[in-house]
Image: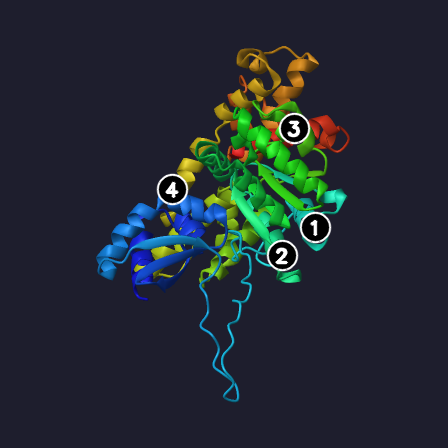
């Protein structure tokens, strides 16, 4: 049985790590009549492997296994019959039921999720959904926000917590494009009944990036019926989206309505303290030691999302290991200079001004001009406050970018926006949406 490990090792060099982890590593191998049988945990994994990887697996199996063929099946390899007891003849036994893994990544849980003000409510909602799956107050649960903010981490954490509480829980994780591919293949092969039956046997469905359904009418209709069946059966549904679903063009109104039945929670870009804690936490996971001052420096320079923070940590620790140097402030500044430069270019004052003008439906020259009407002054103050929040520019530099205004005008704008956000829910919502848009 050295054939499959050898094939898998080769496949890891040919396909993206995420594909290997999601589709290939869950496969279990066993011999049958001289051939190699790969057992998938569910039909989705089997179908995806068959469509995308099986031809290459067969090529490698013949190379490593002297002509062995490869078959796909669902379940787990049969175990050998147990030895007889007290000379009694051995009786055939059914193979024990194997846990249903359903593509849920075991590495993500609530313990290694760094909590902060930006994600506190989302974490609490995911935790409660895991403790009491199917309860109407948080079913469905929708987590929305920009890329790399921890939505999928919380989704996996909830799935793993459900399985910790009930090891027999059948929790299925899918990306929306995988649902689409599976449904499209079922239409072509006239196996839609089999496709639908897969969802009748699960206890929870975790589905990522539902904005992918936009414009795909037949897939939306199928997901609509799947959603209704799961909801009526009190099976937990957890979804993610890159924005509030009502803002996604191309989603049907009835589907948008269904998505609003339960609890929708935004995850915002992490604040400074949370970013620093994320840096320290991710470094510990890699067995690296980063001084607090370096973590704070990275948190100050990189404001967008967790993935970019992880990229900075990976680069820093790899360079330190290769060069045999300690991670100091000087070393961090030298190593991450290019990353910081790219970050500053991505979130510039000009980008902020354009984003705010587009958001409020204004001409840029109007927003930057001298008129003080409220319809122009408030967006102008919003853009100034965002420039102070998201860039390293000083108040005078921001003032110059806003048609040569004085730094005291910028300071007043920042204070005014902060004050208004405490009492004006719409303004606070505008701020959060713009932060998410600029941090993507």
Question: Where is 256 relative to 49, above or below?
Answer: above
Contact, CB < 8 Å: mark 2 with mark 3?
Answer: no
Nearer the observer, disc 2 or disc 3? 2
Q: In the depicted view, which residue is nearer to us: 85 or 402?
A: 85
Residue pictured at 55% horizontal, 47% vertical: 173
Report whether 326 appears left or right of 421: left
Which comes before the other along the chain, label 4 or label 3?
Answer: 4
Residue at 43 percent of width and 57 percent of height: 39
| C-beta proximity under 8 Å, tags 4 and 2 | no
Does the CB distance between marks 1 and 4 fall below 8 Å? Answer: no
Residue farthest along the front direction in this orientation = 89
In the rendered structure, the answer to whether residue 188 lies left or right of residue 163 reads left
- Badge 1 or badge 4: first in the primary sequence: 4
Q: Quick check: 337 above or below 405?
A: below
* Numbered circle sitting on residue 256: 3
Q: CA distance from mark 4 to mark 2?
A: 28 Å
The answer for how far apart the CA atoms under marks 2 and 1 are is 10 Å
Closer-to-camera residue (152/307): 152
Dot in front, 4 or 3: 4
**Secondary structure category for the residue under label 4:** helix
Q: First in sequence, mark 2 or 1: give its number.
A: 1
Residue under circle 2? Answer: 169
Helix, strand or loop for disc 2: loop
- CA separation in Å, label 1 and label 4: 33 Å
**Which residue is found at the position 49% from the left and 23% from the top?**
350
Which quadrant is home to the N terminus?
A: bottom left
Q: Which mark is residue 133?
A: 1
Residue at image coords 67%, 36%: 228
Give the x, y percent position of residue 189. 44, 35
* Residue topped by disc 4: 51
């Amino acid at each position: 049985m050295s054939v499959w490990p050898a094939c898998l090792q080769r496949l890891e060099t040919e396909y993206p790590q995420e594909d290997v982890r999601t589709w290939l590593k869950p496969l279990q191998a066993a011999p049958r009549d001289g051939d190699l049988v790969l057992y998938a945990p569910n039909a989705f994994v089997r179908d995806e492997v068959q469509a995308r990887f099986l031809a290459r697996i067969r090529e490698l199996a013949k190379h490593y296994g002297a002509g062995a063929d490869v078959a796909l099946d669902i379940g787990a390899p049969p175990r050998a019959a147990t030895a007889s007891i007290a000379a009694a003849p051995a009786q055939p036994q059914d193979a024990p039921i194997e846990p249903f893994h359903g593509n849920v990544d075991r590495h993500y849980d609530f313990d290694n999720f760094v909590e902060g003000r930006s994600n506190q409510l989302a974490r609490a909602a995911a935790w409660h959904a895991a403790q009491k799956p199917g309860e109407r107050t948080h079913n469905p649960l929708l987590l929305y926000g920009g890329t790399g903010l921890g939505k999928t981490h919380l989704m996996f954490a909830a799935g793993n917590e459900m399985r910790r509480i009930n090891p027999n829980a059948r929790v299925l994780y899918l990306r929306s494009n995988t649902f689409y591919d599976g449904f499209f293949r079922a239409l072509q092969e006239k196996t839609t009944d089999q496709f639908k039956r897969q969802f009748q046997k699960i206890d929870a469905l975790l589905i990522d990036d539902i904005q992918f359904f936009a414009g795909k009418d037949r897939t939306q209709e199928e997901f609509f019926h799947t959603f209704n069946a799961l909801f009526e059966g009190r099976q937990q549904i957890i979804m993610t989206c890159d924005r509030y679903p009502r803002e996604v063009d191309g989603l049907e109104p009835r589907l948008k309505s269904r998505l609003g039945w339960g609890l929708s929670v935004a995850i915002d870009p992490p604040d400074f303290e949370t970013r620093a804690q994320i840096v320290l936490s991710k470094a510990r996971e890699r067995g690296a030691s980063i001084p607090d001052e370096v973590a704070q420096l990275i948190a100050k320079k990189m404001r967008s999302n967790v993935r970019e923070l992880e990229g900075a940590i990976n680069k820093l620790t790899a360079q330190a290991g290769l060069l045999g140097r300690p991670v100091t402030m000087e070393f961090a500044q030298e190593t991450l200079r290019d990353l910081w430069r790219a970050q500053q270019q991505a979130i510039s004052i000009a980008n902020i001004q354009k984003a705010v003008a587009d958001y409020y439906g204004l001409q840029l020259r109007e927003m930057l001009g001298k008129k003080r009407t409220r319809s122009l002054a408030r967006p102008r103050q919003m853009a100034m406050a965002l420039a102070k929040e998201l860039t390293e520019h000083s108040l005078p530099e921001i003032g110059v970018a806003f048609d040569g205004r004085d730094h005291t005008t910028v300071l007043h704008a920042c204070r005014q926006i902060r004050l208004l956000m405490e009492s004006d829910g719409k303004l606070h919502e505008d701020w959060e949406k713009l932060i998410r848009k600029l941090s993507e």
